[in-house]
Every structure is written in structure tokens, then in C-alpha cells.
Image (spheres, grey):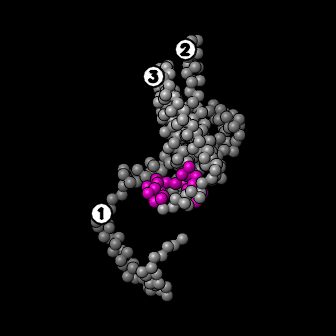
Amino acid sequence: MEKMKTAGKFLLSQWDYALFVLLLLEKVYYFSNVSDTVFTTLGPFAFVGELATWAFGGNSDGIFQGVLLISIGTILLGTFWLLLLHGRKRLFWMAITNLVLSFIILADTLYFRYFEDIISVTVLMQMRQVGDVGESIFALFRLSDALLLVDVVVMAILWVIISRKKAIVNAPSRWAKVGTALVVLMLGWQLTTVPFNKSMEDGGAWQFNKLISNMRVYNFTGLLGFHSANITRYIDDNFINRKVYSEDEISATEEWFDGRNAERVPGPYSGMAEGKNVIVL
């Protein structure tokens, strides 16, 4: 009985992590609202009810409509390690994680308003060019976007206040922290892989693999899931399985283009833009 009470107190002490997950989920929902995509077709109580039905083996397709289920899963997968920390250290890393993820979601929001797509690693590699279009980016901001960053400021202030106090905090046992983190990790894995695999089985595999557009992938992975898949694909294409062309292949390609160019027949507009700085919009 005493052990159950201790376990109950420990779980109740994780309220800060639960609140943190809800805050991130709200930010992901904000992007869904901006992009006018389906987040979920169910209300809160209906979703919880159908989720429980599915967990016990029932058939519930409602929870798979939209990206809510996989969004919860990816958030848990990305933040479960915070449960291994406690006190000021946990709050510090929560604030850092919140800052990074909030920046990504804000960048996605602004990028979508202009290009109607999600920002990718390739685009982020060109961040040095942001200064040239600073005014255009600033024009994309909305007052409601501040909601993505308000809690980051609040968490930073709380961390400064708490850091100045020398309060004695009873650290939970190592096994309690590891056990809870593992449970959340497994839960996040299930909530991520099950809806993703279902989407692939329902005909989404070719859109995911061909990468027609980032928003198409988002519909199967959610926002944070898209960035995880995008980073994984970028690392694979550019480092692990990077395609290296031989000198013979490069020479053959250059010869092919030279041959094609030699066969071109001049038209009435040939050479009109020669020596001019042409910008195509």
C-alpha cells in the first residue's frame, strides 16, 4: 500500500512534463490551423473514448483521421528523455527543447504563409540569405504567432527565479525515472508507428517515397514527424548513401549535353536575353 502511494505521488509530480507535452501539442495544432489541414475529426472526449477502444483491441478509425495521434507520438518520442531529469535541470532542458521546437514551428508557419509548404533541411541550409529578405519575412508575422514563444519566455523567467533559490528537492529514485521514461518511449513509439504504417498501407507509401511535396508527407507524419523523416533522408542522401559519380559518368553526361546543344535549332527569340540580367518570377 505504501509503495502504491509513493508511485502515485511520483506520477503526480510529473505534471510539469504533462503540461509541457500539451503546450507542444497546442503549437502543432496552431500550425494545422494556419495551414487549414485536418488535425482531428473528433472532440476531446470522443477522441479519448475511441483511443481507449482502440487500445483494448476495438476497431476505431476515427483516431486515425488527421495527425493528432501521430503528433502526440512524435512529441513523446522527442521529449521522453526529460523524464530522466528533475528539478532545475529538467526545467532548463525543457526551456531549451521548447525554444528549438517553437522556432521550428514558427519557421514552418511563416514559410507556409508564403510558399504553402513546410520548410526543409535544404532550405534551412540557406539561412544566411535571410538577411536579404528580412522585411518580407517580418511582413509574414501575425500577432497570434507570439503564442508560439510566450511560454518560452515564461519558462526562462521561472528557471532564473528557481535557480536563485537553494531549495532542497527530493530526487526520485533512478528506477522510477528510467521506468517512467521507458513507458513514455514505448507509448510514443506505438502512437507514431501504428498510424504511420496504416497510412502507408492505405496507399500513402508512393507519396511518401516520391516526396511530391512536403505537405503530402506532413499528412502522414505530422509536423515534427515530417522534420524527423526529412532529417533522416537528408543524412542518408548526403552522407550515408551519397551518390558519387565517376569521371567517366561526368564526361558522358557533359558530352550528352554538348551534343544536344549542337542539335538545337535557333528560333526567333534565340539570344534575346544574352548579356542581360534576367530574373524569372
Q: Which of 157 and 180 is in front in this view?
A: 157
Give the residue number, with chain letter if any, for mark 3: 174
| Position of residue 65 measured from the top left corner of the image (x, y, whole percent) | 65, 45
Q: How crowded is mark 2: few (under 14 residues within 10 Å), some or many (20 or more)?
A: few
The C terminus lies in which quarter of the figure? bottom right
The N terminus lies in which quarter of the figure? top right
**Mark-to-mark CA distance, 1 and 2:** 66 Å
Q: What residue type is labelled 3?
A: Arg
Name which residue lies at 33% across and 74% down.
255
Q: What residue type is labelled 1?
A: Ser
Q: In this view, does 57 lie above or below 30?
A: above
Q: What stretch is highlighted in magenta?
A: 106-131
Q: Nearer the viewer, residue 251 or 115?
A: 115
| Position of residue 100 measured from the top left corner of the image (x, y, whole percent) | 50, 43
Q: In this view, does 177 lie to the left or right of 55?
A: left
Q: Residue 246 carries which label?
A: 1
**Mark-to-mark CA distance, 1 and 3:** 54 Å
Residue 28: quadrant of the picture: top right
Q: How crowded is mark 3: few (under 14 residues within 10 Å), some or many (20 or more)?
A: few
Question: Is disc 3 placed on a helix, strand or loop?
Answer: helix
| Position of residue 267 measured from the top left corner of the image (x, y, whole percent) | 48, 86
Q: Is the magenta stretch mostly helix, strand or loop?
A: helix
Task: Inspect this view and state whether residue 190 appears.
Answer: no
Question: Is disc 2 placed on a helix, strand or loop?
Answer: helix
Q: What residue type is labelled 2?
A: Lys
Question: Is disc 1 placed on a helix, strand or loop?
Answer: loop
Name which residue lies at 60% across and 37% down.
22
Name which residue lies at 44% across and 48% down.
232
Given this view, does label 1 or label 2 mark the residue nearer the observer?
2
